[in-house]
Amino acid sequence: MYRDEPNGTGVPLPFYAEQGGECALFEHAFRQRLPVLLKGPTGCGKTRFVEHMAARLARPLVTVSCHDDLTAADLVGRHLIGDGNTVWHDGPLARAVRQGALCYLDEVVEARKDTTVVLHPLADDRRQLPIERTGELLQAPPEFMLVVSYNPGYQNLLKNLKPSTRQRFVALTFDYPAPEVERRIVAAESGVDERLATRLVKLASALRRLTDQDLEETVSTRLLVVAARLVASGLPELAACRAAIVDALTDDADTAEALNEVVLAAFNTD
């Protein structure tokens, strides 16, 4: 959802409910040409925050969803054969540098460590991207900004940022919003009334307090918005919560039954 807020271009900003000065900190980092690391659980608003800030700063946004098979060539670029000729094609990182864009690497710890090493000269005072295969050395313009994110809840010995990488970044820690902020987000993103938004946020609070269920992740703000949108389209509340929240969180029948009991309790309080 978008809101008409001035950003100097006449383009409306993606809706974002600020929680604690993160927008100002991001702007300071941008002006000082510092890269930013966003830490927080799945679905808490990290990606929306970057979209909001890119629009607020009137910069193009290049987003890369990182994964185990992501190579340095996927980021930087490679030679491709076409019409009998070998032609160099920039990857998303090189394109972002040339455009002076915000480059957002989502879940950066999912990428191989030999891939993330290419970020080092961009993330320090050099602000350079060497392209070894062409011999080119790209100098990032002042408008370029590198932003990465990861979910500390998934950390283990094999998937963690090297100290030599993370210490190049200004860190911003995210969590699920405070209830009053989360209610505003759910209502604004889905169009539901305050009553339903409040019930969904109370449900989320109850589910997040659960400690005896084997869940990799708890209910996110994103899932609350999905459930609310289903209700806004006419689906009954319980069916929407089961589809968007319970079945999204687990495949285990016993766990799903326990979560459904929490849902029933939350929606049978009137």
Image (cartoon, rainbow, N blue to C red):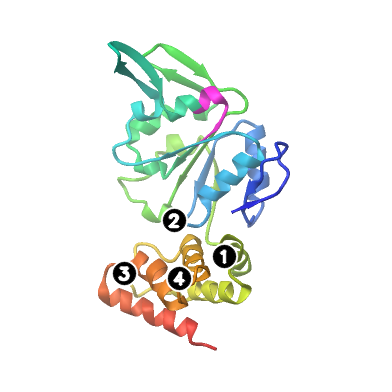
Secondary structure beneath dot 3 equals: loop
Q: Is residue 269 above or below residue 35?
A: below
Q: Is residue 114 visible?
A: yes
> Which residue is disc 1 drawn over?
186
User: Could you tell me how far apart the alpha carbons at marks 2 and 3 are, in whole angstroms?
Assistant: 17 Å
Q: Is residue 98 magenta?
A: yes
On residue 214, which mark appears? Answer: 3
Which residue is found at the position 39% from the left and 33% from the top? 116
Q: Position of residue 230 (x, y in %)?
A: 47, 67
- Decide which of tag 2 and tag 3 comes sooner along the chain: 2
The tag on residue 42 is 2
Q: Amino acid at mark 3?
A: Asp
Q: CA distance from mark 1 to mark 4?
A: 17 Å
| Residue density around tag 3, few if under 14, some if 14–19, many if 20 or more, within 10 Å | few
Residue located at (37% from left, 45% from top): 160
Magenta range: 96-103
| C-alpha gap between disc 1 and disc 3 | 26 Å
Of the two numbered discs 1 and 3 in the rendering, the one whose residue sits closer to the viewer: 1
Q: CA distance from mark 4 to mark 3?
A: 12 Å
For residue 99, what is the image quadrant? top right
Q: Position of residue 29 (x, y in %)?
A: 63, 37
Q: Which amino acid lies under the numbered mark 2 shown in the image of this protein? A: Thr
Closer to the camera in the image, 188 or 104: 188
Residue located beneath label 4 in the image: 208
Among the two numbered marks 1 and 4 on one chain, the one whose residue lies closer to the N terminus: 1
Percent position of residue 205, x then y: 50, 73
Q: Secondary structure at mark 2?
A: loop
